[in-house]
Image (cartoon, rainbow, N blue to C red):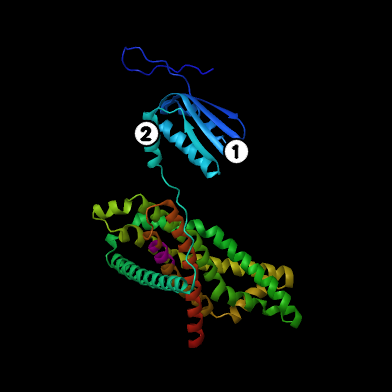
Amino acid sequence: MRGALPCRASTAETCPVMTAPSLTLENKENMLIVRLAGTMLTPFLDRIEKPIAQVGTGSATVVLDLGSVDAVDTGGAWLIVDLQRRLEAAGAQVSTRGLSPAQQNLLQTVAGHFPEEEVAEAPPRGLLPWVESVGAGTVGTWQGFVSVIGFFGLTLHRLVRALLMPWRLRWASVVTQMEETGLKAIPIVALMGFLIGVVLAFQGATQLRQFGAEVFVVELISISVLRELGILLTAIIVAGRSGSAFTASIGSMKVQEEIDAMRTLGLDPIDVLVVPRTLALLVMLPILGFIADIAGLFGGALMSWINLGVSPGMFVTRLQENTDVWHLAVGLIKAPFFAMVIGVVACWQAMQVRGSAQSVGQRTTASVVQSIFAVIAIDALFSIFFSEIGV
């Protein structure tokens, strides 16, 4: 038995009796009869939404019996139409009965404005669509390259102007970014450098022992860490840690239209957001690279002492005698270039965010991938350059 619903009339007139909506199912000769009854009005639909959602069919024919429905509004009509469409999608033939002409018109109106499900179109196949997609990808890549080069020039101009006119620089923001990108990254960078030194010493000792040249592990560790691995892996860590943070934070501001608000107030987003972050990387990445070098040498010395019996004193002596200071300089010279690339790519990707949190995630991923690729490519170019000049 259906319960009575409270009267919601705002006047003193007597309300008509309203009964709670209900649903019953009856299977009859391979036909499912769905009986809806009561008041199908929006304020009371929460009582019947779950039973309607659980209606399934194993029958070829379904009849929606609405003869006991006392009243129906747009919300109730939407629920009925949704049930009808869902059953038809399952392969049943659905019909309705018991509706008044006014109620039937309401259901037809709601059904006519029911949103259609978007079906993803199959991608075109064949040689011509493939050539078209390759061409579109090539043009898009070229346009992105031109855009990032323009952004790099704009950032470089603003950075030089800020250095020539330091009173224009936002020092509080620079110090904050130095703390975030540099100070808080020291533990992970030092641990990475230490483990790289340990691995180099262990693997190098295994190979050099075959030739009785274990003592040369010092040169192997020092040159590898100081010239290449220390600064390269530090830049990769910074690209994944700080570069992604730059893209996510500025991209979120782009989504919330805070950057448009800055422009409205006469503030340049490059000066406010990009320059402090890039300058912080330019200062902190060489420092982090030096810390990684020291940690790598310490890890290599420790493993050489444990595994090969090379004492710390002998390690330091061979390091001083056979390792040129240029090996350290070569690594640190790369650091500002890595920092500039990481900062520019991360901030440029943030500026490409368009209107949704999903775009922020996509651009953050692209920022990390492109930054790491650019760092490795620049490192390869520097290796060729230093090799050609004999350093």
Q: Which residues are magenta?
A: 342-348
Q: Report the predominant secondary structure element of the magenta stretch.
A: helix
Res. 358 mark = none
Looking at the rendered structure, the secondary structure element under dot 2 is helix
The answer to whether any part of residue 5 appears in the image is yes
Please indicate whether residue 204 sits to the left or right of residue 33 in the image: right
Residue labelled with disc 2: 105
**Amino acid type shown at disc 1:** Ser
Q: Nearer the viewer, residue 246 or 76?
A: 76
Q: Earlier in the sequence, mark 2 or mark 1?
A: 1
Exactly how many numbered labels are in the figure? Answer: 2
**Magenta run includes residue 46:** no
Q: Toward the viewer: 166 or 119?
A: 119
The quadrant of the picture occupied by the N terminus is top right
Q: Is residue 128 above or below residue 6?
A: below
Residue 162 drawn above or below residue 25? below
Residue that label 1 marks: 59
Give residue 177's position: percent from left, percent from top.
41, 57
User: What's under tag 2, amino acid-wise?
Assistant: Asn
Q: Is residue 53 left or right of residue 280?
A: right
Q: With 380 as the anchor, is 148 left or right in this view? A: left
Would you place residue 365 above or below residue 147 in this image? above
x then y, percent, for residue 383: 51, 80
Q: Residue 198 at x, y = what percent? A: 66, 67
